[in-house]
Amino acid sequence: MTNLFLPLVADVTGNVNDPVNFTFFIGCMAMMAASAFFFLSLSQFDKKWRSSVLVSGLITFIAAVHYWYMRDAAMAGALENVTAFRYVDWILTVPLMCVEFYLILKVAGATKSLLNKMILLSVVMLVTGYIGESGGDAVIWGTISGLAYFAIAYEIWLGGAAKLAKEAGGDVLHAHKILCWFVLVGWAIYPVGYMAGTEGWYGAAGLFFGMELDMQVLYNIADAINKIGFGLVIYSLAVKKTS
Ligand SMILES: *C/C=C(C)/C=C/C=C(C)/C=C/C1=C(C)CCCC1(C)C
């Protein structure tokens, strides 16, 4: 009898019960389901809000495709390939999250220069993080990446974006605040994962306050929280603004 699951296990040396492989698999499914949800909901919204929800769907869809490849690479034990796919995913999806901030703040007059500034900071954060993970000094490059991350958090919590959100008020202000918390708390999982997976921080075993952490598992959990959660905040804002 043919094995229905053969395509899942073919050419694979890894163990499906391993938390890394398992979270790649479930992450892929979650991103696919979220994309279908966002795309299929589009027609119910006012035109103005459709592009915001469309971008939410693009973020999870791009991630779903990358998770497909990352899952294969992880199960074959090719972690360098996982890192490359990971950063290609992020360099596409994080700027799209900046676009989400821009789109919801457009009602209060958000400018392209705010968008460009946020995209530039996120590119600096990710390129330096990639260098630190792929052979560069993990402490130096990770620190530069962290500074860019703080600059993004500052911009949305206290900088120009915060001012615009206050001017917009109401549902937009409320949604902006939740997105700010995602960036401050949800995004903070990434540097913890980075420190677990690179040399020079809290030990090669990835021990963090006595817990053994795995970089890929932390990145996978963070992606699910941030990409799907972020999208749902935008979705519910669009629902409120439409009805
Ligand atoms: C959907 C993907 C998202 C929201 C990815 C976010 C990634 C970060 C916030 C990464 C941050 C990093 C640091 C702040 C320092 C260490 C290097 C990074 C790139 C892991």
Image: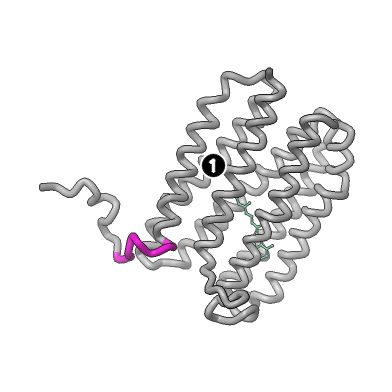
Q: Is residue 10 left or right of residue 57?
A: left
SS for dot 1: helix
Ligand 1 is in which quadrant of the figure? Answer: bottom right
Q: Residue at x 63, y 67 (%)?
A: 192
Q: 233 above or below 195?
A: above
Res. 170 image quadrant? top right
Does ligand 1 reach within 8 Å of label 1's beta carbon?
no
Q: Residue at x 57, y 57 (%)?
A: 87
Q: 5 above or below 106?
A: below
Magenta-tinted stretch? 13-20
| Residue to which mark 1 is pinned | 60
Magenta-span inclusion, residue 1: no
What amino acid is labelled 1 in the image? Answer: Thr
Image location (x, y in percent) of residue 81: 46, 63
Magenta part, dominant SS: loop
Name the quarter where the C terminus is drawn: top right
Give the colour scheme of this rendering: one colour
Q: Is residue 117 left or right of residue 200?
A: right
Q: Quick one: label 1, few (<14), some, or many (20+) residues within 10 Å?
A: many
Q: Residue furthest front?
A: 210
Q: Residue at x 48, y 32 (%)?
A: 36
108 or 112: nearer the viewer? 108
Q: Is residue 88 left or right of residue 117?
A: left
Res. 235 image quadrant? top right
Q: How many marks?
A: 1
Magenta-span inclusion, residue 15: yes
Image location (x, y in percent) of residue 38: 55, 31
Q: 227 above or below 35?
A: below
Q: Residue at x 61, y 74 (%)?
A: 208
Image location (x, y in percent) of residue 65: 46, 46
